[in-house]
Image: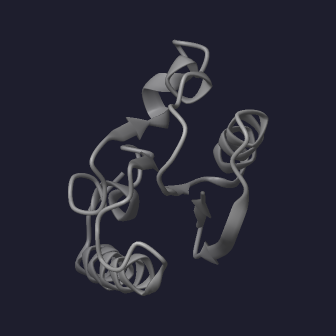
Amino acid sequence: MRLSRRSLLTSLLFAAAAGSAVAAGPRRGRPASLLVYDSRWPQSRALCGRLAERAVDVAHEHAHRWQSLRTVPAGGTIIGLTSWSDLVLARTLLQERGRRLRSETRYGNLFYLEMA
C-alpha cells in the first residue's frame, strides 16, 4: 500500500472528525476505553494512540481468534475503524459481551463504529 498526499490528508481529516465525534459524546472529550483499528489501513492507523486508552489491531486478531475482543471488560466506550468484514465480526463479538451499537458510519473503504 502506497501512502500518498491524498490518503494522508484523508486520514488527518477523518482523525479530526472522529475526535470531535468522540468529544461530542457522553464522555465529553475523554478517550474511549478501547479502539479497534486495522494497521493495514493508513486512515485507521492515524487514530491509534490518540483516541483510546487501549487499542486492538484486527490485523493480528485473526491469528489469536479475536481473543482480545472476547475478553473486553465491561464499561467504557469502544470505537473502531476497520473494513466491513472485520467490523461485522467485532460488532458481533462485542454485542455478545453486552455492548450496544451507538453509531456506524462509512468513510470511504472503511467503517467507523461506536459502541457502549
Q: Give the number of marks.
A: 0
* Furthest-top residue in this view: 64
Q: Which of the two residues, 19 or 47, is positioned nearer the viewer here?
A: 19
Residue at 60% from the left image edge and 62% from the top image edge = 113
Q: Up-down: is 111 above or below 56?
A: below
Q: Which of the two residues, 63 or 70, is positioned nearer the viewer here?
A: 70
Q: Which of the 4 image quarters holds residue 15?
A: bottom left
Residue at 27% from the left image edge and 62% from the top image edge = 46
Q: Which of the 4 image quarters holds residue 100?
A: bottom right
Q: Up-down: is 2 above or below 71?
A: below
**Snapshot colouring:** one colour
Q: Up-down: is 8 above or below 36?
A: below
| Residue 65 horizontal/vertical position (percent) | 61, 15
Residue at 56% from the left image edge and 30% from the top image edge = 69
| Residue 93 horizontal/vertical position (percent) | 71, 34
Left or right: 76 in relation to 13: right
Quadrant of the image for the C terminus?
A: bottom right
Left or right: 112 in relation to 87: left
Q: Which of the two residues, 39 or 31, is positioned nearer the viewer here?
A: 31
| Residue 47 horizontal/vertical position (percent) | 31, 61
